[in-house]
Amino acid sequence: MEGTKSTNGNLVTILSIDGGGIKGIIPGIILAFLESELQKLDGEDARLADYFDVIAGTSTGGLLTAMIATPDENNRPVFAANEIYDFYYEHGPKIFPQDIDKISNMLKGPIYDGEYLHTIIKEKLGSKLLHETLTNVVKNYPLLDASLSDICIGTSAVPIYLPAHYFETKDSDGVVREFNLIDGVFAANNPVLIAVGEVMEGIMRGSTEFSTIEPLGYDKFLVISLGTTAPKVEEKYNAKDAAKWNIIKWIINENSSPLLNAVDIGGENMVDLHMFQLFQALQSPQNYLRIQDDTLPSSMSGADDASLDNMANLKAFAEELLKKPVSRLNLDTGALEPVDEGTNEDALKRFAILLSQEKKVRTAGSLQGIAANIK
């Protein structure tokens, strides 16, 4: 999780990206659309990292975060958002090879050895540390200043599918901290609440990054939260059948994982519900945008289905999702329901304008500060 360098504006801007394996293609397409809207407003050099105070991601969302926030040799993001899909399409089949015996591998260890994932992450992110991103670290503890490649590998290490990840950090005094990590899905597959909490903690302790925001000033938050979609409710499982399942059935069943789906979807929905209720209570629901969908066909819901056809289908699904109405979670039914706020595209265009305006306010404030110092 990272925060931008300039916060002398009117708002705190937050981007949050859920986990979901190969389904990271879906928020990737949405990010590409948002970045293209910002480019229409501010020029072709505009990048998402220029606009957000905090970017938080879990699992594949963590990888997306690194892709759009890690600097290249010109101190610009190593990936433009419109390059995300090509990355998944090229490397996904090598991270999740489809010609393996999953059951046999699972009985011996992780289904996938993770070697290609580790290699490509290290190749793309190099030896960059967390503090070297295009954004400032919210919590600047030296022992947490790990390499971005280790962070991405750790947050993607979902048990059963990929091996757990170990690494160490060392501060200037030689103090070593050990990290033994598995995928963040089990703690916060939807990390938006953690991102908001980190910012509020910074505000409460008087952090200069958020000096213009009052404690509990949630009406000054501008939040975009991107899901990786949930399988369409087909009622293909019931308690009578599940009562007889062995561990394998809970883990792999009809091209999906009932156990992981329950953990993912339940946690994501609770966080989304809490966030919307919070913004609604503070009379600023328009400042919170959650783009999620619960109609993904089960045949496309596998987090490790990196077949070329499925990846192309996920891209098409994401493009259709942009055209769908903005939806909110119904507390009674647990289903997403459309609301009268236009399409997801419309909402992103509105947020792009707000983000662009906020960036201009910050730039003007910075220039005034420079002029004052010169005088």
Image (spheres, helix red, strand yellow):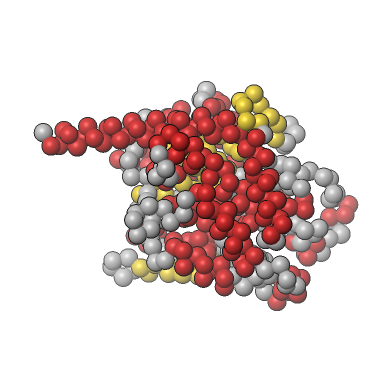
Q: Residue furthest left?
A: 375
Residue in front for this viewpoint, 68 or 141 = 68
Identify which residue is drawn at 38% across, 58% down. Answer: 72
Residue 231 spot, x, y in % from top left? 74, 47
Identify which residue is drawn at 71% across, 41% down. Answer: 294
Report the quarter where the C terminus lies: top left
Residue 8 spot, x, y in % from top left? 31, 35
Q: Is residue 30 visible?
A: yes
The image quarter in which residue 336 lies:
top right
Q: Is residue 196 visible?
A: no
- Compared to residue 127, the image places residue 274 above or below, namely above
Residue 282 spot, x, y in % from top left? 51, 25
- Compared to residue 41, the image places residue 126 above or below, namely below
Residue in front for this viewpoint, 185 or 361 = 361
Identify which residue is drawn at 51% across, 25% down. Answer: 284
Residue 123 spot, x, y in % from top left? 46, 68
Q: Residue furthest bottom?
A: 108
Total marks in image = 0
Identify which residue is drawn at 58% across, 34% down. Answer: 345
Q: Residue furthest right?
A: 240
Please indicate whether residue 55 sits to the left or right of residue 310 in the image. Answer: left
